[in-house]
Amino acid sequence: MARLKFLCDADRCIECNACVTACKNENEVPWGINRRRVVTINDGKPGERSISMACMHCTDAPCAAVCPVSCFYGTADGLVLHDKDLCIGCGYCFYACPFGAPQYPRVGNFGGRGKMDKCTYCAGGPQADNSAVEYAQYGANRLAEGKLPLCAEMCSTKALLAGDGEIIAAIYKERVQRRGYGSGAWGWRTAYKEGLAV
Amino acid sequence: MMRRILPLALLLLAAPATAQDRSPGLSGNLPAGAPEVQAPVPEVGDGRGGQPAGQPPATTEQAPPTGAPAPAVAPVAPAAQPARPAPATDALRGEISAEELGLQRALQGGRIEGRITIPDRQAASLIQPEGREWRVFHNRTLAWTGGIAVLGMLGVLALFYLVRGRIRIESGWSGRSLLRFDLLERANHWMVASSFIVLALSGLNLTFGRYLLLPLIGPEAFTALSHYGKLAHNFLAFPFTLGLVVMLLLWVRDNLPNRIDLAWLRAGGGFLGRGHPAAERFNAGQKLVFWITVLGGGLVAASGFVLLFPFAVTDIGGMQWAQRIHGILSVLMIAAMLGHIYIGTLGTEGAYEAMGSGRVDYNYAKEHHSLWVDEELAKARETVAPPGGARVAGAD
C-alpha cells in the first residue's frame, strides 16, 4: 500500500496561491478557514522561499495523540483523517500540530470553536464515499475517484507534489540532481521522522 | 512596501561599509547540528553559485541564483571595493552563498515564521516544533501528575480515616449553637463549590475520559458528554471567578497569617494527637485552603480565560503555556479540595453545619476555634450589657 505524502519543492514555488484557491473551491471550505496556505520566509531578503503548507498527514500524528475524544483515524494509505461528528472543538490538536493545520470555524460563544476542519488530502471523511453528507462535512473525495489532491494537481510549477512518498521523493531527488540544488523536503523530518537523502 | 525599500536604498548608498559589516554576522551563523529541512546535497550553495566546492570564488560577486531573485546587494557592494583584500569571512561565504546562509539559519529545527497573504496572521507560523513538547506535557506530565495527585490524595484520606477515624466533638453536642457563616458567605461558598465540581469533572474528562469513560460508553455518548462538559466548563468559569473575588473580599481579613498559625501547625492541627490547638475564626489549615482557592483558583481562572479567547492575548506558544499552567494547577487544586471536602464532611464531626445551616455547635466551636468563640462571646456580652453604660432604668 502506498504511503501518501505531500512534498513542496520550495525552489519551484512562486507563491501564486493557486493551491490555496483550488483547495477552497474544490472543498467549498467555509469563510475564515484555509486548509492550505503559502508562507513566504525571508520575504524580500536573500534566501527567500515560499512553501505551501497544509496537514502533512504525519506518522504518529500529534493531533491524534492529544485528542480528548479520539476523533482521528488513520487510513491504509497513511492519511490522518478525523470524524467531525465526534470532534468537540477543544483546540488541543491545534496546540500540538507542528504545522498549524487544524482550523476552527468561530460559531460558538466567546472564542468558542466549532468542529475542527483540516486538509483531508481530498479524501473526505468517515461518511460514505462521495455522498452529499460527506461533501458537506469534509469536501471532495477525489481519492475515491482515483485522483490526487487538487492543490498538487493544479500547481503550475509542479512545486507541490502529492502521491506515494517514495515516488514523489524520487521525482524530487531527480530534480535536485539535475539542477544541482534544493532546500529539501520541508517538514518531512517533523512529520515523518525521516529526511530525504539524495 | 516603503519599509522594505527604504533600508535597501540606504544599503546601496552606504554600500562598501555595510557590505563588509554584514559578512561576519552572516558567517557567524553557520548551521550547526541537523537543520529541520534536510539538505539533499551537502553544500547547498555549491550548485547555485556555480563554484566548485571548497574553492573561494575569483571575485566576491556571485552569479545570480537560478531559483530565487538576485539579491540587490551582492552585485553592488563588492564592486565598489575590488582591490581591497577579502576578509577571512569572505572565504567562508564563498562556500555557502549568503542567501543560503540566511535560509539555513531559519532551518535549525526551530520555529519558522514567514509572511502570509491571507487575513489569518497566525497562519504565518510555518512550523512550530513546540507542539511536540506540549504533546508530551499533555499525554505524560499532566496525566501522571493528575493521576498521582488525585488518587494519592484519595489514598491518603482513606488511610487517615482508617487510622484516625472521624474526629469527634470530644465533649459531645451541647445543643446550643452560634452563627459561623451568614447567608451571603454560604451562598458564595456553594456557588464556587458547585461550579468547581463541574469544572473539575469536565476538566478531568478531557485528560482521562478518553481512557476511562470512552471504552465504557462508546464514542457517540462520550462526545455528547464531552461537548456539554466543554460548554459547562466555558460558562461556569464566570460564576467561579466571581465567587473567588467575593470570597477574597469576605474572608481575607480573617485569613491573614499570624503567630497563632505557627503554634497550630506545630501542634499538628489536632489531627494527630488528642486535644485541639487554639485558633481564631480560621485555623492555619483553613487559611491554607483559602489561599490555595484564591491564589491557585485565580491563576487557573486567568490562564483559563487566555484559552477561552484564542489569540486574544497571546500566540500559540503562550496558549500552550497557559494550558500547562491551567492543567497542572487544576489537578493540584482538585487534590487539595478533596482534602477540604473530607475534613469538612466525613472527617470532622460538627464541621459541615458551618456551611450547611451556618450555625455550629458551641462545643465544636470551643474545641476547634477557641479564640473565635471567646471573641464572639465578648461581642455578645457587649450587646447585652454595654460596658460603662448605666443599666436601663427600671430593669430587673
Image (tube, coloured by chain):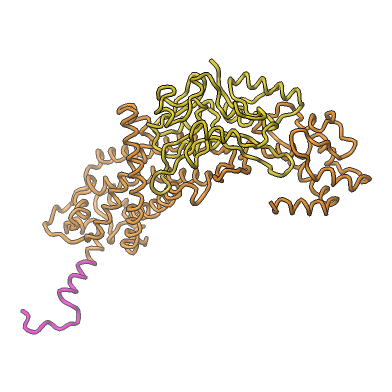
Chain colours: A yellow, B orange
Q: Is residue B246 visible?
A: yes
Q: Is residue B149 left or right of residue B96?
A: left
As for residue B81 lying within the magenta part, the answer is no
Quadrant where the C terminus of chain B sits is: bottom left
Give x and y (percent) for residue B375. Answer: 24, 67
Range covered by the magenta-colored residues: B375-396
Residue B260 shows in this picture = no
Residue at the image point whose x is 82% and y is 48% from the top: B19
Residue A1: x, y in percent?
A: 53, 15
The percent coordinates of residue B319 (x first, y second) are 49, 45
Horizontal and vertical percent for residue A79?
51, 24
Residue located 47% across and 21% down the image: A75
Magenta stretch: includes residue B395: yes
Determine whether B231 is above or below B369 in the image. Answer: above
Query: Which residue appears farthest toward the top when viewing the image?
Result: A1
> Quick one: B221 or B132, which is closer to the camera?
B221
Q: Residue at x 38, y 31 (%)?
A: A86
Query: How many numbered callouts?
Result: 0
Q: Residue at x 89, y 48 (%)?
A: B80
In the displayed structure, B142 sits above or below A175; it is below
Frontmost residue, A66 versus A21: A21
Q: Is residue B87 left or right of residue A103?
A: right
Q: Nearer the viewer, residue A122 or B81?
A: A122
